[in-house]
Image (cartoon, coloured by chain):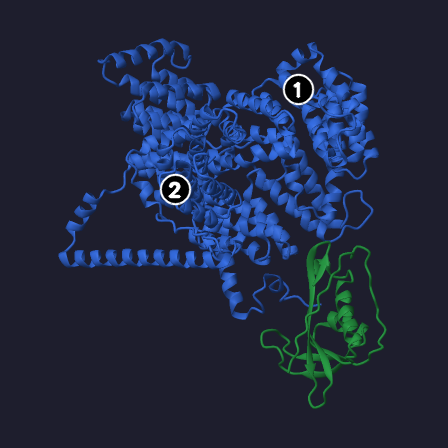
Chain colours: A blue, B green
Amino acid sequence: MGASLPNKEANLFKLIVKSYETKQYKKGLKAADTILKKFPDHGETLSMKGLTLNCMDRKSEAYELVRQGLKNDLKSHVCWHVYGLLYRSDREYREAIKCYRNALKIDPDNIEILRDLSLLQAQMRDLSGFVETRQQLLTLKPNHRMNWIGFSVAHHLNSNASKAVEILEAYEGTLEEDYPPENERCEHGEMLLYKIGYIVNWPPDLISLLEECGFLERALDELHKKEFKIVDKLAYKEQEVSLLVKLGHLQEGEALYQALLSMNPDNYRYYEGLQKCVGLYLEDGQYSPDQIDQLDSLYKTLVQQYKWSSAVKRIPLDFLQGDKFREAADNYIRPLLTKGVPSLFSDLSSLYNHPGKADILEQLILELEQSIRMTGQYPGGTNKEPPSTLMWTLFLLAQHYDRRGQFEIALSKIDEAIEHTPTVIDLYSVKSRILKHAGDLVAAAAFADEARCMDLADRYVNSECVKRMLQADQVSLAEKTAVLFTKDGDQHNNLHDMQCMWYELASGESYFRQGDLGRALKKFLAVEKHYADITEDQFDFHSYCLRKMTLRSYVEMLKFQDQLHSHSYFHKAAAGAIRCYIKLHDSPPKSTAEEDDDMAKLLPSQKKKMRQKQRKAEARAKKEAEEKNEELSASGISKSGKRHVKPVDPDPNGEKLLKVEDPLSEATKYLKLLQKNSPDSLETHLLSFELYTRKQKTLLAFQAVKQLLRLDPEHPDSHRCLIKFFHKVGSMNAPVTDNEKLIWSVLEAERPNISQVHEKSLFEANNSVLDKHKDSLMHRAAFVEILHILDSNRKSEAVKFIEETTNNTVPRNGALGPIREWKLKDCIAVHNLLETVLTDQDAALRWKVRCADYFPYSTYFEGKHSSASPNSAFNQLRKNSENESVNHITSNGKLEAFKDLTI
Amino acid sequence: MAYYSDICVGAIACRLEKKEGGGQVRVYIMTLGVLAPYRGLGIGTKLLNHALDLCSKQNISEVYLHVQTNNEDAINFYKKFGFEITETIQNYYTNITPPDCYVLTRNNIIASYLRGSDQRLLHCFMGFAMDVLH
């Protein structure tokens, strides 16, 4: 480096490099300028100066200098390396890799460049390249532990486990007997566990292969041999037990699981493992009566052993049935109600998916309630229950009826609980949740706010309240409430910086409902950006984890990153963005020309006024933004000495986002991510269908239909898309171009493969779906919609047909009230269908009146108990709070509850 | 405030007052309440005892409060702690009937405590708010 320079300058050059590494950029800059005074064209110095400037936030200068430097000295690996580093700092990894490769052409054995390259290859998952680079590094420096490990990890990631193990063993061969020294015991133990973990976590379909090679035996041997060197004893045992089970040593496995359970009797995986060892484990939980008896007695002994474990008491509720279930549930629930465990319902809620158990639970809890009310004791009990037990029982019942969709009963139970003990916050939260399910989002938000006010220091109730407000489309109120828990200063952006995605999603959805596509898109894309950042965040770990030897977590993290975009938040954000773009395509915002048209209709004086107003508003906004920018930069400098300027968002309302040229191609970007990462979600393919029909991509739309049929051929939406597709194809003109002919022939070849439409008219296909699902509201709705599309003359028939649907009750033996089949969400969808697709306003109104009866709390249908009606619970609450403000004692919610109490 | 297995079910609030004339200080109980389902468990006793304890520690001999004349339960409750009716004020309340109240005063520092204790009252925590009136 700096070879072409005379001595003095060469030393200065070294100083630049050193200053860069120690982040003393000013010093480096000075040295660079000194050299450049004498040698203004020195390439490497120019490059280094550029790199230094890059760290001082002078990007454009940096690029210019680095490019200049490279041009002056194309043969220098330093220049290429620097160029690569510059790209890397801007996350342009592909370009950076190219630069590194060029640098290595000049200096193939440069360890620093090789190491930097390997990091990028790991980040980009260029696995074969990664293996290669790692091999080179090892050859160059075989005495470095990290190089051995790196090479092995590279092989592991490249799915060559045997090679990976071999390398580690070769590495161990180079070590002395007394290795590791005391201060490296942890690292070495990690390495050993990682090595053995390879084998244990091998994909199941390859296990037999491993067994043939005796891999598992060897792993177990190795584990036993190295026991004293492994520091993480728990991981050692867990590894050992899974090896034992895989090798079929079930008895030993059972003993070891017992040992693990005595260490932690609340780990569900240990119980599962134990069941496997004794041959009593089924993935689907459908045990035979005989097996259930055996499991029952197994857990009866375990309960004796692990008295303090709650898992051991809870698990039997999953497999027991009938009377035994009832008895076990009774024993399980009683002490938790006495103690007052607010999470009891969510603990039990998975049981509601088991047939029949919900009814048993209902009877059981009702009996408890009755007994406590009458005698203050549980049925057959001897101890008097504390007064709070009744309140917790009512609380549980309220959640039970909520889950079953009997909102009226749920509300009466929760109201009674609140009257009993008005100081328990959870009661208000649950009341809010019930109202949300019942369809009254405004009242739900109000009660969530009531809960929030009872403990202003509780972030959870605050967040829950924010979410309810967003669901009720009270965005600005929600924003104010959310901000109560963000750091001072940069208020709203803080939520973005904290990657608070639930908030961004919920407010995106709300904006979408309100038709503010710009803001909605802004929020959805913000979430998408978080995911890009998370991918980015892994970069630092490629070097860190190898150095620190946290290999197991490292590989796990890489796997997590590989399927990052399948996370549900991402799915929601991408789906939301696509929906925004589709809507944008269907109803584009007014162009400026149209706006001018609107203006033309106004009187000249009005026009002038409006223009003035607009200009003023613009000027004000601009000024504010500038001031804020200045303020920020000023405070940023004074605080940390470094510049931490965050420019004010130039497009806070997403107006620019609305001006995209082609919203559909924007949407396609996100759709591709969804198709890749959520291929098993109906929504993905529904969106895909919508998008590609609009883009006139017949075959891609057809693919979406096929995916829908693969996932759920009976789903009303699948049916809808299928028929819509073939209806559209049928109404197209005969093919003219080669391309069209090709599409035609593909469809002709494919149609017989789809049983629903094979040798059937679309009418027949539509009828056959109806025959299969006569009583399902949503299938009938799909049928009617399709009927209308196929033949718009049969509209009145369609309307009549949907109105004839009956809302049946679910057969069951519950004690209180019937449960109706229809869901609120579906009824709203049908209302939309009547109103906007079939455009029969009278029918829509009739439907609304009918549904208001089914859903008295729904604001959508303006039910009689909803906040849309003056006599609702919500409006009562508001009245009360108005009264309170007249003669209230203190604004603290807790004390208000006492104001009418005296002893 | 009194917590019954983590539920807030009762509270007491008092304030310090300077007696007219002399420099002596007395305590006025502004409010003492327990939610109806949780009465009869000794929670009020604990709250009041706590306040009285604090008084005796600070050598405050006089504690007083107002109570509605028809609230026999309350009067009996306070009598157990050595309170006595020292005054009747007509038309003290404006929004409830009867509008009259008694002033209950307790002057004896050495009054013996009748502590009703309840086993389940493990987490009884009490805060004692005192405002100094000038």
Q: CA distance from mark 2 to mark 1?
A: 44 Å
Local crowd at mark 1 within 10 Å, few (<14), some, or many (≥20)? many
Chain letter of mark 1 equals A
> Is residue A452 or residue A672 the one in the foreground?
A672
Q: Quick check: do tags 2 and 1 share a chain?
A: yes
Chain letter of mark 2 equals A
| Residue at the front extreme, as displayed | A7
Q: Residue visible at 79% across and 35% down? A: A263
Could you say where residue B28 lies in the image, as x and y percent from the top left? 70, 77
Pointer 1 residue: A165
Indicate the secondary structure of the residue bearing disc 1.
helix
Residue A515: numbered disc: none
Q: In the picture, residue A46 is in which quadrant?
A: top left
- Residue type beneath disc 1: Val
> Is residue A713 or residue B134 the one in the foreground?
B134
Local crowd at mark 2 within 10 Å, few (<14), some, or many (≥20)? many
The answer to which of marks 2 and 1 sits earlier in the sequence is 2
> Is residue A113 or residue A623 the one in the foreground?
A113
| Residue at the bottom extreme, as displayed | B21
- Residue type beneath disc 2: Ala
A822 relative to A374, above or below? above
Pointer 2 residue: A62
